[in-house]
Image (tube, grey):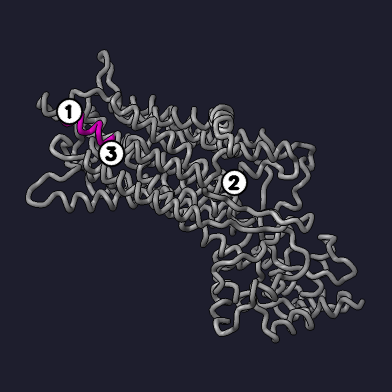
């Protein structure tokens, strides 16, 4: 055949090029195993097992088998190139039924994942909402120490979301990522439950508000921290994978399912809030009465039930293959551009390398900005001869296609917006820590019924859930009717800005409530204030509305703006802003305490809040968030999204988000 020299030439360039062939079915690891197997066959008994097959060497013979299996060899001349992206991985899964005739994907699978997320969140929130009070009453920490313990733990939880996103996109796949890390989550919860049951609650009856437990040894504290950080790993790592895995159950080519996919992220956030609602009412009440053992065992049981539900849909899920290592692709662009720093830049991106053959994904078009990265796609005379005349695959560390360069640009453009969303997480962390401590210093008794301070977060959950459910059905139509000049609802960037503004108002109100609480405390002369805890309701409600604007828009924005095949990474970026917010909240509190505790003063957030000025801390946080909002508006106005080309035509589709 006339095409066989081309095939042999492509293979003779080495195993690395062969491993870049997109088999459509094999991950790189399995592909390398097959190559090793055929190489072994070629050496057994002098290579006589397959060395003479069709007159080809062993690697050429293996290549022919792969091509025949895929039915993609057109007259022996079609070249293949690596295209590890989400759409390519899903290309062989357009059929909506399994071999046994079962329907795959759709709302049946989506609902299983939503219920799983709700039960997992119930378990996680059962630890989260009371970790501050547990640290104070059981571990004997001060207010500042307990708040910092909580902030660092929360930050680590959401840092793990980046790890989970990377593993799911690169190696494990989204389903396997959820299976592995949710099992780790269950192990952490069981370890915490056993430790609490056996040794932490001593003497009996301790752990209630005002009844401290005995000091604990190094071994007990070490096991405690290992347990809660296993919980952080098991909850944080699979969450971005689970969100994108759920959206993956809906077929983009089906208009009805595509509309359902657009609603999935909102329902995903609602399921998170529903799980939190039970934990922040029932479990909070039980644990405030000192029933930590029962509370933690309920959390473990909820996580186990959610895990069983996740496994029950295994045969019906629509799954994608891992899409390749994004870090290596980004590194290739950086290295290739650095190697060609001395080459002149072409005008308007003309003459840049576009890649070979038909791509299974939407091609990203060249955009202005970060022009130094465009050098990675400049073809030298030697590379042109290698690609076009000799038909060899170029070295990805020396030449990258335009789409690969644009992937890096896309992530770089997202970073300023991502950075500005961190302060919204600072407010969220303060709600879960300092708001709770503020509430614990207020009057929590209503008609002889004790209101657990952490249960006030239920107002945050209810307001968030109601706002999400009413937004599209009620608020958007009202907005369109009022804003006749611009009958379009706010887009993602605008909603994030609105949410940040509402968060500022929430912090200011919290500061005024704290001033009123201090006045009532000075009148009563007690450690707690006579001001009712329900004065905190407005600040919790506003934080909830802020969350509904920021977090749902943030998930949608990062999922839509990240390149194909990096959707989990985009979701991980969205969730990692909460991690950075947690660390930033801890750092701000540590600096403030270091500055305000001088000359024997108790500082702004002392163990007894009546001796401090928590109101000033809230006002400082509001001022910092306002500065962040101003910077965000500048970044959002300058943001320019990626431009892609549809697969079924030459028409361009611009993934642009405008902020005006």
Number of disc labels: 3
Q: Quadrant of the N terminus?
A: bottom right
Q: Earlier in the sequence, mark 3 or mark 2?
A: 2
Q: Residue furthest right?
A: 1
Q: On residue 434, which mark appears?
A: 3
Q: Earlier in the sequence, mark 3 or mark 1?
A: 3
Tell me: 220 left or right of 268. Answer: left
Asked whether the viewer can see residue 294, the reply is: no
Q: Residue at x 85, y 66 (%)?
A: 73
Quadrant assignment, res 326? bottom right
Rounded to the nearest whole Å, what is the CA distance between mark 3 and mark 1?
A: 15 Å
Does the CB distance between marks 3 and 1 fall below 8 Å? no
Q: Earlier in the sequence, mark 2 or mark 1?
A: 2
Region in magenta: 510-518
Q: On residue 528, which mark appears?
A: 1
Confirm whether the magenta stretch covers residue 476: no
Q: Is residue 649 above or below residue 195?
A: below
Q: Secondary structure at mark 2?
A: helix
Q: Position of residue 80 (x, y in %)?
A: 76, 68
Q: Residue at x 75, y 37 (%)?
A: 103
Provide the residue designation for mark 2: 244
């Amino acid at each position: 055949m006339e095409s066989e020299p081309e095939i042999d030439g492509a293979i003779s360039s080495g195993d690395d090029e062969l491993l870049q062939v997109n088999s459509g079915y094999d991950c790189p690891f399995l592909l390398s195993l097959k190559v090793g197997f055929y190489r072994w066959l070629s050496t057994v008994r002098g290579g006589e097992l397959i060395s003479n097959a069709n007159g080809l060497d062993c690697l050429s013979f293996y290549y022919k088998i792969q091509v025949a299996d895929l039915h993609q060899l057109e007259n022996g001349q079609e070249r293949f190139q690596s295209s590890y992206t989400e759409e390519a991985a899903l290309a062989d899964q357009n059929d909506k039924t399994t071999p046994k005739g079962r329907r795959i994907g759709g709302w049946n699978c989506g609902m299983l994942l939503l219920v799983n997320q709700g039960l997992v969140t119930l378990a996680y929130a059962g630890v989260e909402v009371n970790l501050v009070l547990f640290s104070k009453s059981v571990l004997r920490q001060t207010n500042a120490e307990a708040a910092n313990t909580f902030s660092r733990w929360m930050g680590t939880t959401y840092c793990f979301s980046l790890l989970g996103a990377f593993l799911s996109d690169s190696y494990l796949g989204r389903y396997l990522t959820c299976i592995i890390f949710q099992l780790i989550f269950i192990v952490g919860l069981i370890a915490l439950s056993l430790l609490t049951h056996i040794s932490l609650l001593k003497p009996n009856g301790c752990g209630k508000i005002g009844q401290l437990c005995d000091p604990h040894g190094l071994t007990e504290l070490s096991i405690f921290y290992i347990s809660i950080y296993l919980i952080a790993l098991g909850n944080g790592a699979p969450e971005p994978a689970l969100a994108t895995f759920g959206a993956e159950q809906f077929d983009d080519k089906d208009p009805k399912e595509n509309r359902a996919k657009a609603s999935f992220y909102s329902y995903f956030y609602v399921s998170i809030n529903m799980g939190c609602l039970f934990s922040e009412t029932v479990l909070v009440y039980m644990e405030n009465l000192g029933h930590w053992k029962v509370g933690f065992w309920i959390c473990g049981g909820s996580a186990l039930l959610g895990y069983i539900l996740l496994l029950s849909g295994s045969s019906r899920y629509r799954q994608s293959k891992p899409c390749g290592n994004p870090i290596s692709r980004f590194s290739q662009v950086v290295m290739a551009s650095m190697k060609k720093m001395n080459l002149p830049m072409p005008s308007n991106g003309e003459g840049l390398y576009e890649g070979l053959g038909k791509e299974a994904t939407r091609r990203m078009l060249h955009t202005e900005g970060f022009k130094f990265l465009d050098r990675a796609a400049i073809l030298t005379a030697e590379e042109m001869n290698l690609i076009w005349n000799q038909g060899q695959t170029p070295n990805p560390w020396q030449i990258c296609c335009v789409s690969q360069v644009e992937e890096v640009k896309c992530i770089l453009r997202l970073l300023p917006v991502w950075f500005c969303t961190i302060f919204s997480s600072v407010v969220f962390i303060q709600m879960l820590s300092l708001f709770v401590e503020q509430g614990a210093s207020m009057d929590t008794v209503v008609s002889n019924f004790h209101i657990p301070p952490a249960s006030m977060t239920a107002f945050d959950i209810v307001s968030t859930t109601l706002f999400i459910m009413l937004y599209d059905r009620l608020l958007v139509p009202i907005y369109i009717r009022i804003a006749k000049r611009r009958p379009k609802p706010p887009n993602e960037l605008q909603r994030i800005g609105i949410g940040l503004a509402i968060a500022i108002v929430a912090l200011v109100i919290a500061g005024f409530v704290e001033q009123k609480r201090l006045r009532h405390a000075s009148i009563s002369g007690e450690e707690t204030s006579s001001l009712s805890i329900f004065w905190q309701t407005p600040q919790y409600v506003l934080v909830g509305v802020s969350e509904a604007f920021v977090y749902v828009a943030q998930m949608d924005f990062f999922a839509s703006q990240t390149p194909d095949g990096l959707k989990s990474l985009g979701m991980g970026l969205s969730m990692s802003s909460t991690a950075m917010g947690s660390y930033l909240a801890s750092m701000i509190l540590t600096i403030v305490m270091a500055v305000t505790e001088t000359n024997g003063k108790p500082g702004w957030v002392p163990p007894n809040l009546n001796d401090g000025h928590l109101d000033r801390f809230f006002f400082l946080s509001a001022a910092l968030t306002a500065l962040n909002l101003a910077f965000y508006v500048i970044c959002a106005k300058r943001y320019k999204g990626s431009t892609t080309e549809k697969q079924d035509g030459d028409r361009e589709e611009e993934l642009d988000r405008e902020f005006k």
